[in-house]
Image: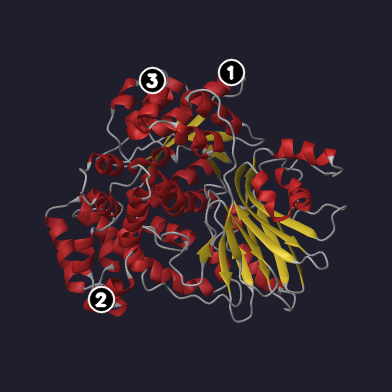
Amino acid sequence: MCRILGSFAAGADRPEPAQLAAVSARQRHGGPDEHHVLSGPGWSLGCDRLAVTDPCGGRQPYRLPHLPGILAVLNGEIYNHAELRRTLAARGHRFPDRCDGTVLPALYAEYGPAFAEHLDGMFAVALLDLRPGRTQLVLAVDDMGMKPLHLHHDPYDGSTRFASEIPALLAFEGVRISPREDALDTVLATRTSFSTHTALAGVDVLPPGATALVRPGTAPVVRRRGPHRVKPLGGTQDVLRHEVRRLARAEVPVCAVTSGGLDSGLVTALAAEHARETDAPPLHTFHLTYRGRWPDSEAAYARAVARRARTVHHEVAVDPDELGSLLTRTVRHLGQPNADPITLSTYALFRAVRQNGFTVALTGDGADELFGGYDRMRAALAAPEGADWAGAYADALSAAPRLLREHLYTANYRAYIADTGSAADRIAQELRSAEAVGADRLTAMTAFETRWRLPAYHLRRLDHLSMAWAVEARLPFLQPSVVTHARSLPVAARTGKRALYEAGAELLPPSVLRRPKQPFTLPVAAMLAPGGPLLDLVREMLSPARLVLGGKIRADRAAKLLARHLEHPTPQAALTLWSLAVHELWTEVVQGMRIPAGCAA
């Protein structure tokens, strides 16, 4: 697991070492163990390494003596590297160590840009082919988009630059930034940047399961690969058990994140079972809560899971007075606004994981998308024929419903969004189109969630905020065998996570199996109430002077919304106010991102 960076430009000079050092410094928190950058005329390739597989080997960029001119860097884990190494060794390739990424130059030599089709894992790979007559840059990410890769292509000089994190990418000279005009609407409509876009014009994310080919002086040509196919064996519990055990093996300490819900509970139970059966030390589990009395606490459920699984449980209590500084740090690490208050919880949780000596953490992310766990999915399935279920589904994704968004916008901004279209409109249209060509509603929703929303909303956040503390988050639910198994189930088994409840019947406490669904997040409505720890911060971010300068939100209506919320706090008003505040803070933070400086955790 690492942070990677690089540049590719025809006929350009060798990049300045100081510039590359500035890029690396902004994402060094994710790769504190080793740093190395190679460069030449018109190109650079670098890595900040978090040593997980073969910690004493695996120097990046990867080079093999018998394959001069082929260089590679890897962010992530290749779980089938041992099998690939055996196959490649039989073809005459030689490897200096056991590191997973060492196989990449040989794999490319055998298969060219199709090399990524042979990888099983979570990965973002950059590979430079500098052999005469073959010069090109190849970029690839895993099927689910677990490890994001941010790109900038300059159409004027033909250069392409990339980095694992947006702040690092912006430290490259020549990467010009401007906030996208529709960024505010997109954040309010979908809670984060949508699709392959970021909140910055000119900075994109390579889509899940894609390979990009960059030839000298040309823009990246992106194509989607077919999924990495495996044949799952057994039922839901068996498939998940296999993946949890596979991902629980590491050469560094491994723990589990235990929210108190079904998904993380299953992962926790199976990982603890594996530790007992292999005579390993007991599994450590981590749960985040906030000091004081706050609604919707899941701490009791997490403790019940830990007791049942017999783990060493860590209940991490964050002081609410710290939330203001946590918000600034999460916005800086993400490089773009994310309206979900879960960002603060995620950042604080992985800080505790790292401070307790763990480098790998198993999580339950991805289960809702694959097994139909969201309330909005159940509502869409229950909607009668002829109802606009797709529009209602899109509205359920929002931080602020359409009518509220339009009420808050200035006349000019409302007209702009009406003219260009909202991300919410594109989401609804994609769902309608899928149904129109014969997909059942659940399949249409699952396809949208896994292709677009999961990587943009969940996985970029999880990657950036775990790696902010040099922790590798591993996701059993998003491994190919589980994905293939979930998609093969009948609709009934995928609705409301029925298959997962059946899998957890013998593994989890009845209280956890019976509890209503609740996201792992921050009690923002209570914390924005009179006297709450977030109120002053939100007031500052939504001051009339700020909003008038931005020109998109009517300051008088934002003030009335805040006043109404303080009289009668509601989750919807709180989330809208929070989202506006996050966007305002991001516009402030992004102005400083062009200054080459380290981004400390």
Give the quadrant of residue 545. Answer: bottom left
Q: Position of residue 188 (x, y in %)?
A: 30, 61
Answer above or below: position of 464 versus 162. Answer: above
What mark, if any, has residue 277 been given in the picture? 1
Residue topped by disc 2 = 415
Q: Position of residue 7 (x, y in %)?
A: 66, 68
**Of the residues tagged 2 and 1, which is closer to the observer?**
2
The residue at 66%/52% (across/down) is: 74
> Which numbered disc flags the more N-terminal residue, 2 or 3?
2
Secondary element type, mark 3: loop
Contact between marks 2 and 3 (CB within 8 A): the answer is: no
Residue topped by disc 3 = 505
Q: Position of residue 380 (x, y in %)?
A: 27, 44
Q: Is residue 51 visible?
A: no
Answer above or below: position of 279 versus 210. Answer: above
> Which numbered disc flags the more N-terminal residue, 1 or 3?
1
Dot 3 amino acid type: Ala
Q: Position of residue 411 (x, y in %)?
A: 21, 77
The residue at 20%/62% (across/down) is: 404
Label 1, label 3: how far apart the Cα atoms are: 20 Å
The residue at 30%/38% (across/down) is: 518
> Which numbered disc flags the more N-terminal residue, 2 or 1?
1
The residue at 51%/29% (across/down) is: 240
Q: Is residue 486 visible?
A: yes
Q: Answer with left or right where residue 439 lies relative to residue 238.
A: left
**Of the residues tagged 1 and 3, which is closer to the observer?**
3
